[in-house]
Image (tube, rainbow, N blue to C red):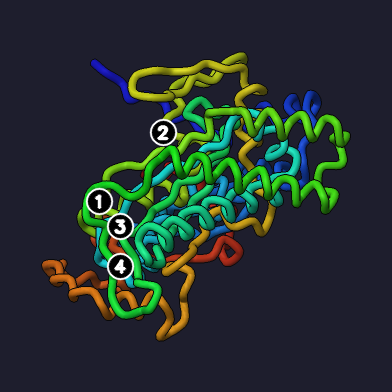
């Protein structure tokens, strides 16, 4: 007889080992706030309501989500809302998936100054792609960029995923220029441009006093090392043919966090074991696991999803709408059966209507989850 595998949760690891983490490592206010929200997500600490059956009287508490973008529990709904919002804006053309990764020497700067360095990386990637679109195609491309800062084993590894239209609006605005083959631009050219633009951006940041921890000699040495480094890696995947595939694919990246709860296989007092790639796993001490996790917390207000070129145009009559008007209207998809959004929920046990009662309105303490099941 087989028994279901116990479910492990990052929130449990945070509650058990956060104090040890903070005793060993200094955390930023952003990191502390994220850990607090994750530990309270979907618990009574954030409030909620009780679902009460009007027939059999069964009660089930439902607690509020923290809605933090780093919380594994809160991203599925946010991801679907984002996909639904973008569905009306995506162009009915093929799209390439590109990945732009600076070398390892870039990481200490990104870790100490994430806002400035990540912004420079976004600008460098968008500039090089839009520049190549103008010079090679005579067109303005559409770009959607997503920042990721981790590997599958949670090591610090900043890189940018980009969804790129396989063509763009001609510079005179008269036609849509399509890429003729399953090839966008040479990856070596993109790698050289990424290196040149990032080095120039870092030097400008230095002139503004962004890297005070580095002496001028140390900074010059770092720039020389980055300039000589060959691993400015650019990867371009074959284009997607259908726009709905583009959205579902990109949705996997837009709201992904460092690790999902489903990847955590085992948790003990001295270890956390989680799945990395395929059937491979990694095991870390709980404090090391949390240390790696908080490395990927972004500063408040930092936008990890950005749009450029055609996709930056949100105004009516802008470049995006000009490009859409030059493309054939896509065939409508088969209509899905209508969903009654406002239909009341019914009890699985007796079929009666379920009411939602705020916890503050309950005449007694809410029941323990599962006691009425």
SS at circle 2: helix
Q: Is residue 237 above or below residue 91?
A: above
Q: Position of residue 266 (x, y in %)?
A: 47, 20
Residue 93 percent location from the top left of the image: 25, 62
Tag 3, which secondary structure? loop
Query: Which comes sooner in the sequence, label 1 or label 3?
Result: 3
Q: Are marks 2 and 1 in contact (CB under 8 Å)?
A: no
**Label disc, if present, on residue 262 of the rendered structure:** 2
How packed mark 2 is, by other alpha carbons closer than 10 Å (few <14, some 14-19, many 20 or more), is few
Quadrant placement of the C terminus: top left
> Looking at the image, which residue is at 46% across and 27% down?
264
Q: Residue furthest bottom?
A: 317
Q: Nearer the viewer, mark 3 or mark 2?
A: 3
Along the polypeptide, which appears first: circle 3 or circle 4? 4
How far is disc 1 from disc 3 in space, using C-alphas?
9 Å
- The quarter of the displayed image where residue 278 is located: top left
For mark 1, what is the residue? 240
> Residue, x 68% and y 48% (percent of image)?
200
Which tag is nearer the camera, tag 3 or tag 4? 3
**Of 358 and 183, which appears nearest the observer?**
183
- The first of marks 4 and 2 along the sequence is 4
Q: Earlier in the sequence, mark 4 or mark 1?
A: 4
Q: Which class describes the residues within 10 Å of circle 1: few (<14), some (14-19), or many (20+)? A: some
Q: Name the N-terminal-most of marks 3 and 2.
A: 3
Residue at mark 4 to residue at mark 2: CA–CA distance = 33 Å
Task: Give residue 117's mark.
Answer: none
Neighbor class of circle 3 (other Cα within 10 Å; few <14, some 14-19, many 20+) is: many
């Amino acid at each position: 007889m087989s028994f279901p595998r116990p479910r492990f949760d990052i929130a449990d690891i945070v509650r058990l080992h956060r104090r040890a983490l903070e005793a060993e490592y200094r955390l930023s206010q952003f990191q502390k706030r994220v850990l607090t929200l994750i530990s309270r997500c979907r618990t009574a600490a954030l409030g909620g309501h009780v679902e009460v059956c009007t027939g059999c009287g069964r009660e089930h508490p439902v607690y509020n989500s923290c809605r933090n973008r780093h919380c594994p529990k809160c991203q599925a709904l946010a991801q679907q809302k984002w996909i639904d919002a973008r569905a009306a804006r995506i162009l009915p053309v093929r799209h390439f998936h590109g990945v732009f990764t600076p070398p390892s020497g870039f990481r200490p700067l990104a870790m100490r100054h994430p806002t400035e360095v990540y912004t420079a990386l976004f600008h460098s990637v968008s500039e090089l792609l839009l520049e190549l679109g103008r010079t090679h195609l005579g067109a303005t491309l559409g770009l959607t960029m997503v920042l990721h800062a981790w590997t599958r084993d949670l090591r610090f590894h900043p890189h940018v995923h980009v969804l790129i239209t396989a063509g763009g609006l001609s510079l005179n605005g008269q036609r849509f220029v399509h890429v003729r083959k399953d090839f966008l631009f040479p990856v070596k050219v993109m790698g050289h441009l990424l290196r040149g633009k990032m080095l120039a951006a870092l030097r400008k940041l230095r002139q503004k006093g962004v890297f005070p921890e580095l002496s001028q000699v140390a900074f010059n040495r770092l720039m020389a090392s980055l300039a000589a480094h060959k691993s400015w890696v650019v990867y371009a995947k074959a284009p997607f043919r259908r726009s709905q595939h583009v959205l579902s694919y990109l949705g996997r990246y837009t709201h992904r966090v460092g690790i999902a709860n489903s990847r955590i296989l085992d948790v003990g007092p001295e270890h956390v074991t989680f799945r990395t790639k395929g059937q491979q796993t990694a095991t870390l001490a709980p404090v090391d696991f949390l240390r790696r996790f908080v490395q990927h917390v972004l500063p408040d207000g930092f936008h990890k999803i950005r749009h450029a070129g055609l996709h930056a145009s949100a105004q009516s009559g802008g470049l995006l709408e000009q490009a859409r008007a030059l493309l054939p209207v896509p065939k409508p998809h088969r209509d899905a059966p209508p969903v009654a959004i406002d239909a009341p929920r019914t009890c699985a046990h007796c079929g009666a209507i379920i009411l939602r009662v705020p916890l503050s309105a309950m005449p007694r303490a809410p029941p323990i989850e599962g006691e009425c099941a």
